[in-house]
Image: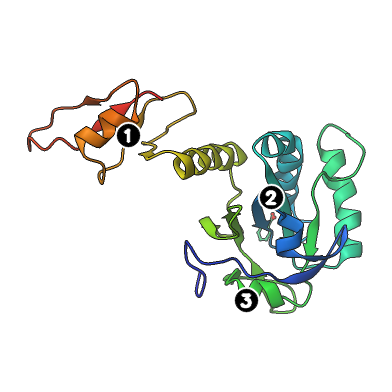
Amino acid sequence: MPGLLLGDVFPNFEADTTIGRIKFHEFLGSSWGVLFSHPKDFTPVCTTELACAAKVSDEFKKRGVKMIALSIDSVEDHRNWSKDVMAFNSGAEGTLPFPIIADDKRELSVQLGMLDPDEIDKDGMPLTARCVFVIGPDKKLKLSILYPATTGRNFDELLRVIDSLQLTAQKKVATPVDWKPGDKVMVIPSLSDAEANALFPNGFTTKEVPSGKKYLRYTQL
Ligand code: BEZ
């Protein structure tokens, strides 16, 4: 993802979307945001992903995260495709619960480093990869994921990482492998034992390892 690193302020781009023209930072307001890109409208994997995103949109809302999708077709295509997406969800009707950016000139896809050179459309033009950007209320990039066009994403995993990002933005902890909300978390290495005891009312436990180093410290929040 050339040019955009974790901690960078996410570009305040303007774009046409299925809810009209937006300025990204105004669209986000004081919320968290997730921007996820798709290679093309009316394609199979993208349709399954958008349908899943629509199905779990209440979970994003609960976490105060505004969703926005992007694909390299027009607003009109997006609106027509949205009907297929909603119908894919067991024939559900209604509008998609989040907007789709129309990046038909690929300007944003180029700016954000989202084009996948291995996936070419019938005119020889590269398609967008499956990027996910999670943006914090401070408008800074908190997480990016980049999948090729041929691999669909897992929206449960996106919710899981958002839970981790929101928790670790507030508390001096890190979440271990396969962590889920409610599981024990790890005390970050920069905290001394004394600081950890002061910060965590439940204290912490340390797992012994052959090195004798006491860095595997768990706490239950
Ligand atoms: C799809 O969404 O199914 C797809 C799009 C572009 C390339 C490969 C698959």
Residue at (27% x, 33% y) in the render = 196
Find the distance from the CA under tag 2 to the CA under tag 3: 24 Å
Residue at (75% x, 48% y) in the render = 47
Tell me which amino acid carries mark 3: Gln
Q: Position of residue 193 (x, y in %)?
A: 20, 34
Residue 111, which numbered label?
3
> Does label 2 point to a residue whose CB lies under 8 Å from ligand 1?
yes
Q: Residues within 10 Å of mark 3 (few under 14, many from 20)?
A: some
- Is 78 placed above or below 85 here? below
> Quarter of the image holding residue 99?
bottom right
Residue at (75% x, 35% y) in the render = 55
Tell me which amino acid carries mark 1: Met
Whether residue 89 can be seen here: yes
- Is 6 placed above or below 187 here? below
Q: How many marks?
A: 3
Q: Position of residue 17 (x, y in %)?
A: 83, 62
The residue beneath circle 2 is 45
Quadrant of the frame with the C terminus:
top left
Residue 63, which numbered label?
none
Find the distance from the CA under tag 3 to the CA under tag 1: 36 Å
The residue beneath circle 1 is 186
Q: Are marks 3 and 1 in contact (CB under 8 Å)?
A: no
Q: How is the image coloured?
A: rainbow
